[in-house]
């Protein structure tokens, strides 16, 4: 029987990240993807503008899925609206499947007060209900309130996030740390594991974080261990960056092309 996986996420109109990236990733892993949309992101004057869907509409979407589908896994991306966090929490407590949360936090249009409230709600209400959180370097700094400049400070941040949220964490180092290696760090409260690959000189990186998290969720649904899931997903994203598509504004999206060699 086909396995089903839900993404609770925003819509990225340019389809590099968001639910569009999640669905493409689910399809790669031969999983049937479903969506519950939290918000819609568009570009105005070279900046993303986020339009929220109401918490009630999100609740209706999740109830529809609960009534009709037996899920095999869940991936959570951009929520954006604090009121929606409680709706998602109420949904998650009814699930017993692998859950990966990508805690998207970099909202340029919001105040520090909003950011602080949102971070607190995420860590208090959702982190304890999921199997893994996947912040990027900036998000890990915001969650831990630790400046990350090297592998040692990544480990300190991971410990703080784990202690606060009582969940495993993988910090996506990406291109931001110095050196020739793209480093991701996993911590489950007991053990650190570091994943390294050579950095790519490519502009096609939009959506890499979303794709990494949804690939991990997919691999967990398929029965992989967390470490296996992270390693396989890192390779998948690496290829998606290499094969990505350029946009006319000079940026580029990740894109794993299934039939590239055919």
Image: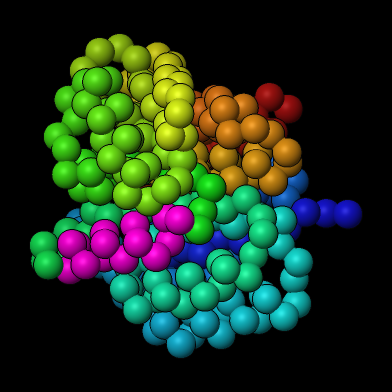
Residue 219 falls left or right of residue 78 = right
Which percent across, then down, holds residue 86? 42, 75
All told, the count of numbered labels is 0
Q: Residue at the spot x=57%, y=79% of the render?
A: 61
Q: Residue at the spot x=36%, y=21% of the render?
A: 182
Q: Is residue 200 visible?
A: no
Whether residue 221 is situated above or below residue 234 in the rendered picture: below
Magenta stretch encompasses residue 100:
no
For the C terminus, which image quadrant? top right
Which percent across, then down, holds residue 170? 42, 35
Residue 49 falls left or right of residue 34 = left
Q: Is residue 201 visible?
A: yes
Quadrant of res 152: top left
Whether residue 69 is situated above or below residue 144 in the rendered picture: below
Which percent across, then down, holds residue 90? 52, 75
Q: Residue at the spot x=58%, y=34% of the render?
A: 226
Q: Residue at the spot x=43%, y=34% of the render?
A: 189
For the N terminus, which image quadrant? bottom right
Which percent across, then down, holds residue 164? 32, 49
Residue 256 falls left or right of residue 31 = left
Q: Depth check: give the residue in front, 85 or 109.
A: 85
Magenta stretch: give its range. Answer: 114-128
């Amino acid at each position: 029987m086909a396995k089903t996986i839900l993404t609770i996420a925003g819509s990225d109109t340019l389809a590099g990240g968001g639910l569009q990236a999640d669905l493409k990733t689910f399809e790669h892993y031969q999983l049937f993807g479903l969506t519950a949309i939290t918000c819609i992101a568009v570009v105005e004057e070279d900046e993303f503008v986020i339009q929220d869907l109401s918490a009630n509409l999100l609740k209706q979407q999740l109830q529809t899925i609960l009534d009709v589908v037996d899920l095999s896994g869940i991936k959570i991306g951009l929520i954006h609206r604090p009121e929606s966090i409680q709706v998602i929490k109420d949904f998650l407590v009814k699930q017993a499947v692998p859950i990966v949360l990508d805690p998207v936090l970099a909202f340029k249009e919001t105040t520090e007060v909003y950011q602080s409230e949102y971070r607190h709600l995420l860590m208090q209400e959702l982190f304890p209900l999921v199997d893994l959180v996947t912040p990027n370097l900036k998000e890990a700094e915001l969650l831990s309130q630790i400046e990350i400049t090297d592998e040692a400070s990544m480990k300190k941040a991971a410990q703080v996030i784990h202690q606060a949220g009582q969940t495993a964490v993988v910090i996506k180092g990406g291109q931001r740390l110095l050196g020739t290696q793209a480093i991701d760090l996993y911590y489950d409260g007991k053990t650190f594991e570091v994943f390294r690959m050579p950095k790519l000189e490519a502009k096609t990186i939009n959506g890499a974080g979303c794709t990494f998290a949804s690939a991990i969720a997919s691999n967990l649904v398929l029965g992989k261990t967390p470490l296996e899931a992270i390693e396989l997903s890192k390779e998948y994203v690496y290829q998606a960056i290499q094969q990505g598509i350029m946009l006319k504004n000079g940026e580029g999206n990740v894109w794993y092309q299934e039939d590239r060699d055919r």
